[in-house]
Amino acid sequence: MTIGQWDVVVLALPYGQSVDPRPCIVVEPPARDGSLCVIPLSSHLELSQEWRDFQFHPGQPDFKATGLRRASYANGSEIHRTRGEVQKKLGRLEGQLLRAFRDWAGA
């Protein structure tokens, strides 16, 4: 499976009190050694802070390309994992949603 920057992938990693597989956004080009820098997502919007987090909603342009099934948010915490830990690729950020995310992330 080819993985690139801005792909939405599934990784099993701890996030808050959960260790369930969760979607993550690959925020840097994958390194030659197979390492990835990702930002995990959560669908528990009640924990999100609008002033801090980036929210993904089904009504946003280009949401469908992400492969996400429900509204989610990213809090900007970067985590390093390896390409071999990726369980699957859901989609990728594109168009207006990618531009908005990059602006939020300072990328």
Image (cartoon, helix red, strand yellow):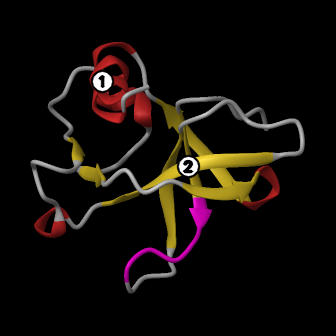
Q: Is residue 20 left or right of residue 12?
A: left
Which mark's residue is nearer the viewer, 2 or 1?
1
Q: Amino acid at mark 2?
A: Val
Viewer-proximal residue among 80 and 97 = 80
Question: Could you tell which of marks 2 and 1 lies nearer the N-terminus?
Answer: 2
Please determine whether, in this image, residue 15 is positioned above or below residue 62: below
Residue 33: x and y, percent? 89, 44
Q: The magenta stretch spans which residues? A: 11-16
Q: Mostly what secondary structure, the magenta segment?
A: loop
Disc 2 to disc 1, how far (Cα)? 16 Å
Element assignment for label 1: helix
Residue 14 belongs to the span the image colors magenta: yes
**Residue placed at 22% from the left, 50% from the top?**
53
**Badge 1 is on which residue?**
103
Q: Is residue 50 left or right of residue 77?
A: left
**Residue placed at 37% from the left, 79% from the top?**
16
Q: Residue furthest right?
A: 33
**Residue placed at 36% from the left, 34% from the top?**
105
Residue 96 quadrant: top left
